[in-house]
Image (cartoon, rainbow, N blue to C red):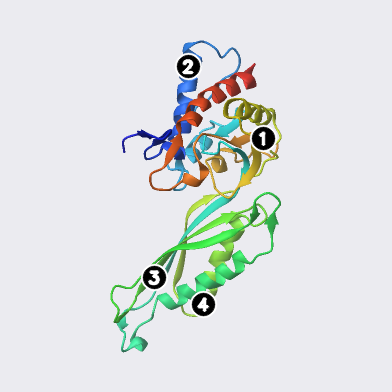
Amino acid sequence: FVMTERNGNLYGRGTNDMKAGLVNLALTMIELKANNELKNGTVRFMATTGEEVGGAGSKKLYEEGYMDDVDYLWVAEPSPETIIYSHKGSLNFRITSLGEAAHSSMPNHGYNAINPIMKYLLELDEKLNNDPRSNEVLGKLVMSTTILNAGNQVNSIPEKAVAEINVRTIAEFDNDEVIALFKETAEKYNQEGSKIEVKVTMSLPSVFTTGKSDMVELTKELGKKHLNLDIKVEGSPGVTDASNLLRGKDASFPFMMYGPGETKMAHKTDEYVRKDYYLAFFDIYRELILGLTK
């Protein structure tokens, strides 16, 4: 919880994902304002809450019109070697199976909540992860069951089982279709005597843009200049606030994810940002803003 410099890295919770990029943007804008360098246009700084758990902040900013007059959007997530111009969507489900408790020696007097939810999850895993549809940039949809809780003692039939599932979606197999499939499959099981409830706890659509813009080209030049890196332009399996902020925009809208930090360090213990990259991004962002507004 205290930023610590060691071996050229800045360690601390959030340094990599993505407070370094956020501070880069904030201080760059403060300096541009203080030095009266921005002669044309307007730069809008949008800091959001809840990006990891539903994107409530970016959803609110979108609904209140903060993206209506925006010509470019970039997100300062960690990715110094690669400009991300498209990414998958993200769907979270909470699936609850209800049964009836009983002694394990007399299971016929109850209803095991685990059995139907296991069959339900395996059926959906089979359908989703083996679906042949694929996006040319982002690849195939991915479903992962990540949490499963049930029962309270070994000799009792569990009356409740709860699972959490994350699905990374693509435009060809989008959030609405996945949600409908989860609900239709639950209804099938319920007609056979199960009690399965489906709750969508997060739904962020995929982002697909062409990646062709003056912003991307200028950023590639600046990455080479300040980081001495040949910047790649690719899609990502991750998700950003762009899922909410780009609602209603077409594929030609200039968007990128580009910031200091290491993508591989996201959600890891002892995360860090390279100090030289962090400092270089002040120059990259300053020259990017001035280049796009000249």
Asked if residue 138 is positioned above or below residue 210 in the image, the reply reads below
Please tell me whether mark 1 sits on a helix, a strand or a loop: loop
From the image, tell me which residue sits under label 3.
161
Please tell me whether mark 2 sits on a helix, a strand or a loop: helix
From the image, tell me which residue sits under label 1.
253
Q: Nearer the viewer, residue 273 or 118?
A: 273
Q: Disc 1 to disc 2, how far (Cα)? A: 28 Å
Quarter of the image with the N terminus is top left
Identity of the amino acid at label 1? Phe
Give how far across and how far down residue 84 sits, in percent: 61, 40
Q: First in sequence, mark 4 or 1: give its number.
A: 4
Q: First in sequence, mark 3 or 1: give its number.
A: 3
Could you tell me if the residues under marks 3 and 4 are in contact, i.e. CB atoms within 8 Å?
Answer: no
Neighbourhood count class around disc 1 (C-alpha, 10 Å): few under 14, some 14–19, many 20 upward: some
Q: Nearer the viewer, residue 272 or 87?
A: 272
Q: Nearer the viewer, mark 1 or mark 2?
A: 2
**Residue 191 - label:** 4
Q: Nearer the viewer, mark 2 or mark 4?
A: 2
Q: Nearer the viewer, mark 4 or mark 1?
A: 1
Please tell me whether mark 4 sits on a helix, a strand or a loop: helix
Please tell me whether mark 3 sits on a helix, a strand or a loop: strand
Quarter of the image with the C terminus is top right
From the image, tell me which residue sits under label 2.
31
Give how far across and how far down residue 112 sits, in percent: 39, 79
Q: Disc 3 to disc 4, how far (Cα)? A: 18 Å
x 63%, y 67%: residue: 130
x 65%, y 51%: residue: 138
Q: Nearer the viewer, residue 7 or 52?
A: 7
Q: Disc 2 to disc 3, how far (Cα)? A: 54 Å
Could you tell me if the residues under marks 2 and 4 are in contact, i.e. CB atoms within 8 Å?
Answer: no
Q: Disc 2 to disc 4, how far (Cα)? A: 63 Å
